[in-house]
Amino acid sequence: MSTIAADPSALVLLSGGLDSTALASLLRPALTVFIDYGQLPHTAESRAAGAVAAHLGLPFERVRLPLRELGGGLMMDDTPLPGSPSPEWWPYRNQFLATAGAAVALRHGLSRVALASVEGDGDRHVDGSQAFYRQLNALMKMQEGGIEVVAPAAQTTTVDLLRQATADRALLGWTVSCHRANEPCGDCPGCWKRELVLAEYLQEG
Ligand SMILES: [Zn+2]
């Protein structure tokens, strides 16, 4: 577990889930951005992200990046793509999102985009791994603008991230986790993980 310090020149991509909420709370970035890329739960996620940003007192923007024609997995429909490493895999998603975030960061004169991949994400899809972020960062930094792409929590579990952020129930209450619906389905990896994480985290408090 690494300690995550405030980063006022960063932009944080906020999905309204536990990981990005805790990360935004720790980084206190200049801007938080929600991207509607056509994921099924975009309405709930967008509302949650806006509420989390307001709760944390952080500037917030919404961006539309219509990727539904290119999507797949649980966040698109229930049909996994050939070669899919996990049911929720949306091909090249984090690459698209980081690139869109970098374009917004550039416009605002910010130097870094932070995504909330956490420990274990890289086991489910390569674009959640540290190796992926190292490569993407190198690719982004060599381009005009020199924007960095970072995943400060890539070696931190969600429970440890919540502990560091001392996330309270009022903040957690705004967050959403379901991959496939605006109302929690209770039966997807996002819903399962949320239940396990909150049971472990809240029993400590
Ligand atoms: Zn669900």
Image (cartoon, helix red, strand yellow):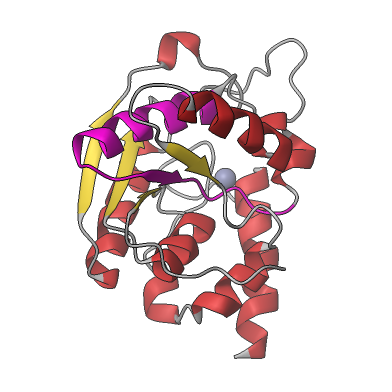
Q: Residue at x 58, y 24 (%)?
A: 90
What's the magenta region? 93-119
Which picture quadrant has residue 168?
A: bottom left
Q: Is residue 57 above or below residue 46?
A: below
Along the viewing direction, whichever of 133 and 119 lies nearer the viewer: 133
Q: Residue at x 40, y 16 (%)?
A: 67
Looking at the rendered image, the quarter that the C terminus falls into is bottom right
Q: Horizontal and vertical percent for residue 76?
A: 51, 23
Looking at the rendered image, the quarter that the N terminus falls into is bottom right
Q: Is residue 77 magenta?
A: no
Along the viewing direction, whichever of 195 and 168 lies nearer the viewer: 168
Q: Is residue 49 above or below residue 133?
A: below
Q: Horizontal and vertical percent for residue 118?
A: 65, 53
Q: Is residue 187 visible?
A: no
Along the viewing direction, whichever of 7 and 65 lies nearer the viewer: 7
Q: Is residue 13 above or below residue 19?
A: above
